[in-house]
Image (cartoon, helix red, strand yellow):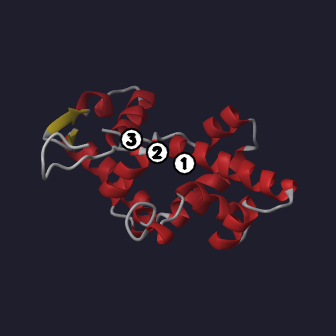
Amino acid sequence: KPHHRGAVILSLDESGQEVRLAADYSRDQNLSLCFVGAKDQLRDIHSMVACKIAGVEYEEFVRMRKSPDPEVAQRADRIRHTAKICVFASFYGAMAPKIAESLGIAESEAQGYIDAIYSEFPGLASWKSEVETFATAHGYVDIKGGGRRHLRDSILGDDKWVAQKALRQASNA
């Protein structure tokens, strides 16, 4: 019950903030469909990636997850689970070799998930590339709320591993 007349009670769900922030920063239309629109039109990002891997349309994949056949439903859930891990790993800059190692899958399979992510959400790939280009040119990235993350020393340093890490951090700022 609100503490005074006219007040509004607000409930916040902070799960999946990385995905919401990526949608906001990248302005990718498909990614935005996960959060903006009528409830019956919202899409699940992990199922959007998983359906590409399964080679079926989104609606068919959703039906597979709800299948009365436990084998079909479990297979779909496994694909979605792997897609979810790959989505978050790719947001943090993990590449196919690391994802494959972490999941115990072939590197080519991990690359297939990454390709599916960037195929389904092309604005995400463009945005990440733009951020990395900006960080390389200017040595920093701006952070929502007015902050700035300085990366020049790491990007321009002799250690290429540190430079690559800094570029991954640029899109995570």
Q: Nearer the viewer, residue 11 or 113?
A: 11
Q: Amino acid at mark 2?
A: Phe
User: In this image, 59 relative to 35: left or right?
Assistant: right
Q: Amino acid at mark 1?
A: Val
- Within 10 Å of the Cα at label 1, are there few (<14), some (14-19), or many (20+) other Cα atoms? many
Q: Nearer the viewer, residue 5 or 76?
A: 5
Q: Which residue is mark 3?
A: 14
Q: Measured from the top left, where is residue 21 in percent x and y?
A: 34, 49
Q: Which residue is mark 1?
A: 87
Q: Are marks 3 and 1 in contact (CB under 8 Å)?
A: no
Total marks in image: 3
* Mark 2 → mark 1, Cα distance in angstroms: 6 Å
Q: Are marks 2 and 1 in contact (CB under 8 Å)?
A: yes
Can residue 108 be seen here? no
Residue placed at 75% from the left, 35% from the top?
104
* Mark 3 → mark 2, Cα distance in angstroms: 17 Å
Of badges 3 and 2, nearer the viewer stands 3
Q: Are marks 3 and 2 in contact (CB under 8 Å)?
A: no
Q: Measured from the top left, where is residue 48 in percent x and y?
A: 58, 63
Marker disc for residue 91: 2
- Within 10 Å of the Cα at label 2, are there few (<14), some (14-19), or many (20+) other Cα atoms? some
Q: Measured from the top left, where is residue 53 in percent x and y?
A: 70, 61
Of badges 3 and 1, nearer the viewer stands 3
User: In this image, 20 relative to 94: left or right?
Assistant: left
- The answer to whether 148 is drawn above or below residue 68 in the figure is above
- The answer to whether 70 is drawn above or below residue 92 in the figure is below
The secondary structure type at the circle numbered 1 is helix
Q: Measured from the top left, where is residue 114 in percent x and y?
A: 59, 53
Q: Earlier in the sequence, mark 3 or mark 2?
A: 3
- The answer to whether 47 is drawn above or below residue 38 in the figure is above
